[in-house]
Image (cartoon, rainbow, N blue to C red):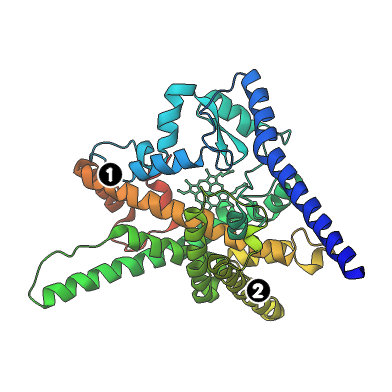
């Protein structure tokens, strides 16, 4: 009799759990999005209808991106929106420059109106926090500056921004020039090898891969000084983490699913542990050598200095947060700069007249030197971004 009561009790518990789960799913995927849609429409925000309760418009985004993958731009055409963000190209003419689409059950407001974008970016009320929807993105960047909000952002900024002031950057110029020189020497060696074999007078170099390598080198050196090799190991692991993150960016995040031991999750956990352990090893070595060598003049040293125990018992940033900032430097600084260089080279290759003008400027300001100094770089007006 006791076991029959026990079984009934379990059935009731399971039925209650199932009802709760169904209720929660109905609220999360049907009732709440519908109510939010009504509110947004009342404020004049339109957008594509949710094509699936569960995926929202993510299916449409994936379909449009797959079609965009087949687009080849004409050499003179710089409009990459149909490839990179085809959904915006499709929806802006239909719904206006500010519209809403559905990231699963979460509304995402797209702002393509300059005035509204300025208003959002200048807002200091905290109404527009950073997008923290993707668990893998959080793992990639942690609580570093790019993802931090409000007071946390100000706390991180106090430590990180001084590391980027002009005097510190001046000191890093020689390191950056040395990395660039090593890359160019590699090209020259390849050319000499071809010529030595009596072959071609030219070599073909895949520049985007070279610039990825160069920017990873520069960040590893400027962030970690003499421990740059371990910095590059961090970079390799983060690169894979970044690939997983971006390949799942348009997948619905099922609550709790990131805790399941799937193959991908286990790989993500391992990479995450590897990144943290390597960074902590670099930090611990630095702290141990502090009395003899100081914290160092690289980005890590400057952060450790600002959070050193000498400043009191409660450092501005914890060690975990310093680790997150190291990850942020790689993520924020590597792909951005490597794509910038690749794109600049592409444009120069299509505009040989500009190649000539830039070459003349470099020869004039840097003379016969292989590696420019910071003062020389300051004189390059045509080559500067401003
Ligand atoms: C062409 C090169 C770069 C471009 C186009 C670029 C672009 C941007 C943009 C648009 C943001 C604002 C992101 C947001 O608030 O949502 C940002 C923030 C940031 N970037 Fe860059 N970036 C570049 C290079 C770098 C480099 C080399 C580093 C460091 C090694 C870096 C570190 C950061 C950091 C730490 C933030 C967060 C700043 C804050 O919130 O105070 N970036 N970047």
Asked whether the residues under the numbered discs 1 and 2 touch, taking CB atoms below 8 Å apart as contact, a structural biologist would say no
Q: Earlier in the sequence, mark 1 or mark 2?
A: 2
Residue 347: which quarter of the image? top left
In the rendered image, the quadrant that contains the N terminus is bottom right
* Residue 251 image position (x, y, % from top left): 53, 50
Mark 1 CB near ligand 1 (8 Å cut): no
* Residue 281 image position (x, y, % from top left): 63, 77
Relative to the observer, which residue lies in front, 162 or 18? 18
Q: Residues within 10 Å of mark 2 (few under 14, many from 20)?
A: some
Q: Give the residue displayed 62% in from the left and 47% down from the top.
A: 133
* Label total for image: 2
Mark 2 CB near ligand 1 (8 Å cut): no
Q: Can residue 376 be seen at all in this image of the molecule?
A: no
Q: Give the residue displayed 67% in from the left and 57% down from the top.
A: 256
Q: Residues within 10 Å of mark 1 (few under 14, many from 20)?
A: some
Per the rendering, the mark at residue 170 is none
* Residue 243 image position (x, y, % from top left): 47, 59
* Residue 353 image position (x, y, % from top left): 20, 41
Q: Is residue 72 left or right of residue 290?
A: left
Residue placed under numbered mark 1 in the picture: 347
Secondary structure of residue under mark 1:
helix
Residue placed under numbered mark 2 in the picture: 280
The residue mark sitting in front, 1 or 2, is 2
């Amino acid at each position: 009799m006791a076991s029959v009561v026990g079984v009934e009790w379990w059935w009731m518990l399971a039925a209650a759990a199932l009802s709760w789960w169904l209720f929660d799913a109905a609220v999360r995927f049907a009732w709440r999005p519908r109510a939010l849609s009504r509110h947004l429409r009342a404020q004049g925000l339109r957008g594509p209808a949710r094509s699936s309760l569960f995926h929202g418009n993510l299916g449409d985004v994936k379909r449009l991106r797959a079609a965009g993958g087949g687009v080849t731009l004409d050499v003179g055409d710089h409009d990459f929106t149909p490839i990179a963000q085809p959904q915006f190209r499709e929806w802006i003419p239909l719904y206006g420059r500010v519209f809403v689409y559905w990231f699963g059950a979460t509304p995402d407001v797209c702002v393509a109106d300059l005035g509204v974008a300025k208003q959002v970016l200048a807002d200091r009320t905290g109404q527009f926090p950073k997008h923290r929807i993707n668990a893998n993105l959080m793992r990639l960047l942690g609580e570093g500056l790019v993802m931090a909000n409000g007071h946390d952002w100000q706390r991180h900024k106090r430590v990180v921004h001084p590391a980027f002031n002009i005097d510190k950057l001046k000191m890093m110029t020689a390191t950056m020039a040395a990395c660039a020189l090593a890359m160019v020497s590699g090209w020259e060696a390849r050319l000499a090898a071809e010529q030595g074999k009596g072959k071609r007078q030219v070599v073909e170099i895949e520049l985007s891969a070279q610039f990825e390598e160069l920017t990873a080198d520069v960040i590893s050196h400027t962030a970690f000084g003499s421990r740059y090799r371990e910095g590059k190991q961090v970079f390799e692991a983060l690169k894979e983490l970044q690939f997983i993150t971006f390949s799942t960016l348009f997948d619905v995040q099922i609550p709790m699913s990131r805790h399941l031991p799937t193959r991908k999750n286990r790989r993500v956990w391992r990479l995450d542990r590897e990144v943290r352990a390597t960074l902590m090893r670099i930090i611990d070595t630095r702290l141990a050598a502090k009395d003899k060598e100081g914290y160092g003049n690289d980005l890590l040293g400057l952060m450790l200095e600002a959070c050193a125990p000498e400043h009191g018992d409660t450092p501005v940033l914890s060690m975990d947060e310093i680790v997150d900032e190291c990850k942020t430097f790689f993520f924020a600084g590597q792909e951005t700069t490597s794509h910038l260089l690749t794109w600049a080279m592409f444009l120069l290759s299509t505009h040989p007249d500009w190649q000539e003008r830039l070459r003349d400027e470099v020869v004039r300001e840097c003379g016969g030197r292989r590696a420019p100094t910071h003062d020389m770089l300051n004189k390059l007006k045509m080559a500067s971004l401003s």
